[in-house]
Image (tube, helix red, strand yellow):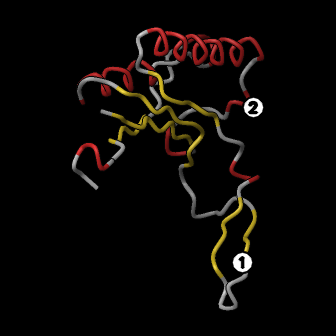
Amino acid sequence: MKYMMLMQFGPLSGLPPMDTWPAEDVSAHIQFMHDTNKTLTEAGEFVDAQGLADPGQAKIVRAGADGKPVITDGVFPETKEFLVGYWIIDVESPERAVELAAYVSAAPGPGGRPLNMPIEVRQVMSVETGEL
């Protein structure tokens, strides 16, 4: 079964913005992510993982009345949380997906303390599973 683990961030998470962390803490956090990806790959559970650019670089695109794209730039004040990265994993059970999400949630933050960041776990629906 494939699952997507979504790493969210924002003021409601209670986590300090990464750009305020000491450089060695950022490096330790990134190394944890690389090590996690390697472990998932070795276990045959890794499908994909990506970090996302700051939401200030985001664009919201809608089809305009004339069919041309209407683009809105930037961060929106009503946005409280935003997606900072994701993993797609292929695991044997929902319980394994939750176990991996809990592990990733405890990634090191400032001072090496576990962040306990919220990780949303959602099954990737497909025709093979009979669900859409």
Disc 2, disc 1: CB below 8 Å? no
Taking 101 as reference, is 23 above or below it?
A: above
From the top left corner, tell me how far across and down residue 64 is, in percent.
Answer: 67, 85
Residue drawn at 70 percent across, 91 percent down: 66
- Determine whether the residue tagged by mark 2 lies in a helix, strand or loop: helix
| Disc 2 target residue | 19
Residue 70 numbered mark, or none: 1
- The tally of labels here is 2
Residue drawn at 57 percent across, 48 percent down: 82
Give the mark nearer the N terminus: 2 vs 1.
2
- Foreground of the two, 42 or 102: 42
Q: Amino acid at mark 2?
A: Asp
Q: Amino acid at mark 1?
A: Val
Label 1 crowd bin: few (<14), some (14–19), many (20+), radius 10 Å? few
Q: Nearer the viewer, mark 2 or mark 1?
A: 1
Taking 29 as reference, is 81 above or below it?
A: below
Taking 80 as reference, is 92 above or below it?
A: above
- In the visual, does 34 lie left or right of 7? right
Residue drawn at 57 percent across, 64 percent down: 78
From the top left corner, tell me how far across and down residue 45 is, in percent.
Answer: 41, 20
